[in-house]
Image: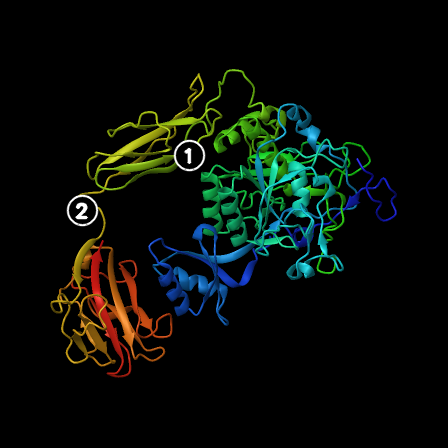
Amino acid sequence: MRKPHSWWGLGAAALMVSTFGMAQAQLQTTPRASLPQPEYVGGEILVKFKNHVSKSEGLEIHRRFSSKLLSEGERNQFQVIEVPAGVSEEDMVRFYNSLPEVEYAELNTKCHATATPNDPFYGFQWHFPQINMPTAWDTSTGSGVVVAVLDSGVAYENYAVPSYESGTVASGVTQYVQAPDLAGTTFVAGWDYVNNDSHPNDNNAHGTHVTGTIAQSTNDSYGVAGVAYDASIMPLKVLDYTGSGTASQLANALYFAADNGADVANMSLSWPSGFNPGSTVSNAINYAYNAGVVLVAAAGNEGVSTVSYPAAYSQVIAVGAVRYDQQRTSYSQYGSAIEIMAPGGDVGVDQDGDGYVDGVLQQTIPAFINIFNLADPSSFSWYFYEGTSMASPHIAGVVALMIANGITGVENIRSVLASTAVDLGASGWDNQYGYGLVDAAAAVAGGGSGPDTTPPTPDPMSFASGPAATGTSSIIMTATTASDASGVEYFFEATNGGNDSGWQSSATYEDTGLSPNTSYSYRVKARDLSANQNETGWSGTESATTDDTGGGGPTELSYDDFENGFGNWLDGGADCRRYTGGTHSHQGNDSINIQDNTSSSVCTYAPNIDATNYNTITVEFWFKMVSMENNEDFWVQWYNGSSWQTVAAFARGQGYNNNTFYSETVTISSSSYNFPSNASIRFRCDASGNRDDVYIDEVRVTAE
C-alpha cells in the first residue's frame, strides 16, 4: 500500500481524514427529538397520469394550470412539471391530485448521501477479514456481474470538466481524472441524471469511496482492495456535488439500471427517517425488483428505530452498520425493516489497536465540505469514512460474488444472506441486527451442503392481505412473501366451507364458486422446495363474507345525452333550454344550456330519489363554459328534504377555461349530507347574464 499523505503535520504515517457533505453536518447538529424534514426541489413537482390519458390530454391539463412539462421520466413512467410563479408546490400537488385523470402527484423530494462526518484519525481495512472476505475470494471475485452504483458519480475516466459543472469543483480544476486505484476496474456505460449527460463523474467524493468498497482494483500492488474486484461497475449519478439528489433522479437511475443489464444496485443514500418519498420512487423500485435487480441500500445514519427509505422498501435489502467489535454503531438505524449488517466503521475508536481509528478505508478525492471548500476530482488519497453508506456496498459486493458463483434469484439471494449471516443480538432475526453480520464466504458457498431442515421464514406463516370479498361468489387473499434458498410454495386452507388452494407458487389465492352473503374462514402455511420440503406453522385464521346479491358495484339510476329530449331532467324554460346545434355538445348534437343566475337558471333531476337506500350518489358529466367571466361559476346542488345545498362549484379561471369540454365526477355522501326519501339533484348557473353559458352533456347518475 502506498504511503498516505501527511495531514496537519502528523507525519507520513497519518492517513487523511475527510468530512462529508451537507447531510452529515445536519446529522451532527440536529437534536434527536427534532429529526430533519425532507427537502424538495423548488418550482417543480412529479405527476403521473392514468394509462388512458393521452399526451395531448395531459398537455391540456398542464395548460389549464399554467404549468409546464419539463421532462418525462424513463419509460414515460412519470413527468417532471414546472410550477407556475406565485403558486406553491404543495398547492400544485393538491390541484393535480384532485383530477380524475391523475394517478398521483407529489413533491420531487431530495435524498442525501448517508456517510456521517469523519473526525481526524482513521484505520485500515479491518472490515474485510471481519466478514470472511479472504475465504470468499478463493471461490469468487465477481466476474461477469454488473453492479450499478447510484450515487454522486465515480472517478472512472479522464474527462474535461464541462463549463456547466465548473462551479461544482475546486477552483482551477479543469479535468476529471480516473482514480488510480480504479485503473484495473471494469466500467460499463452509465448516466449522469444530475447534469443529464453520459459522463457520471464524481464531484463530491462519496460515490468513488462507495465504488471502491464494491470493486476497487485488487491484487495490483497498489492501494486497497474491493469486495468484488472483477465485477463491472455501472456509474449512475443521482447525487450532486453537495451530496443531494431528487426522487426523479433516483427513479430514472433505477429504470436505467433495470433496462441496461445491472444485476445489483447499490443505494448509499436516504431520506429522513419516517419520510416516504412517494409513488415515483416506489414504482421504480418495484420495476427494478421485478426485472431481477438485487436492490441494496443504507439503513440511514440517524440512530433511530426506523429504517429510512429507500432501504425501508420491502423489495430492498436494508443494511445496518457494525464497528470492529461487531456491535451496532450508534448512528446506524434499525427497526422492523433491517435485514443484515456489514462493517460501517466508527472513527471515534481504535478497537483493533493498529494505531488508526476504525473507519472504512478506500481511495477517493478530497471531498466536498461546503460551498467554499469544493471537491477536487483531479487529486486522490485514501480516506476513512463511517456510515451505513459504507456498510451497504459491502453487501452489494458480496451479492455480486454470489451471482458470479451461480446463486441467482432476488429472494433466493436474500434467503442465503440471511441463513448464512453470523447471528448477533437476540437469537434469530431481531430489530437491532436483522439476521446478523454478513459472512461473505458462507454466502458465496450458498450456505453449505448439509440437508435443509429449516422451513421458510416467517414461521409461522402470516397474511399480508387478509381474505376479502371480490363479489358474490369469490374471496381473495395474499400471504406474506416467504423466503427460502430453495424457493417457496403456499397452501391456503378453507376451514369452514370454501375450497383449499393446494400447494401453489403464487402468494395470492382467490377462492371462487362460493355462496352470496356467506362467511368463509382461511389460514395459510408455506413450505420450501428442498428435498425435505420443510413446512411452516399455520397462520392465524381470518374470515371474509361474500357480497349479497345486490352487491357488485353501483346502481345506475339514469344516463342522459339529451339526443331525444330532456330525458330525466326538467325543462327549465328560457334560462335552461335544450341545445341542438352540435357545436356545444360533447357527443351527438344535443346538450343542456344553462344561463345567468335567475331562479329559472337551473336544470333539475325529475324523479325523486329515495336516498335512504344508499350511502353515496355520484353524478358524472361533461361541461363546457362559453363567454363566462373570471370567477363566474355553476353549481351541482343536492336537495336534502328541506333545502338545496351546494356540493360542488366550477368556476372559470380556477382550473377551467371557456370553449373547452371538461369531464367531472361529483360524489355526494350520506356521511356529509342528509339522505331523505325525496332527494334530488340540480345544476345551477351563477353567471351574470344571458350571454354567459354552460353546456352540460352525457349526465350519468349512480347510487351505492
Residue 156's x, y, as percent?
A: 67, 45
172, above or below 326, in the image: below
> Secondary structure beneath disc 1?
loop
Q: Which residue is mark 2?
A: 550
State how far apart marks 2 and 1 are (Cα). Answer: 32 Å
616, above or below 393, in the image: below
Give the residue type at disc 2: Gly
The answer to which image quadrant residue 95 occupies is bottom left
Along the line of sight, which residue is nearer the eye, 540 or 374?
Answer: 374
For label 2, the crowd category at 10 Å Cα-Cα, with few meaning under 14, some 14 to 19 and many 20 or more, is few
CB under 8 Å between discs 2 and 1: no
For label 1, the crowd category at 10 Å Cα-Cα, with few meaning under 14, some 14 to 19 and many 20 or more, is some
Residue at x 85% of width, y 45% of height: 6
Which numbered disc flags the more N-terminal residue, 2 or 1?
A: 1
Residue 255 appears left or right of 661: right
Q: Which residue is mark 1?
A: 480
Residue 369: tell me if it is visible: no
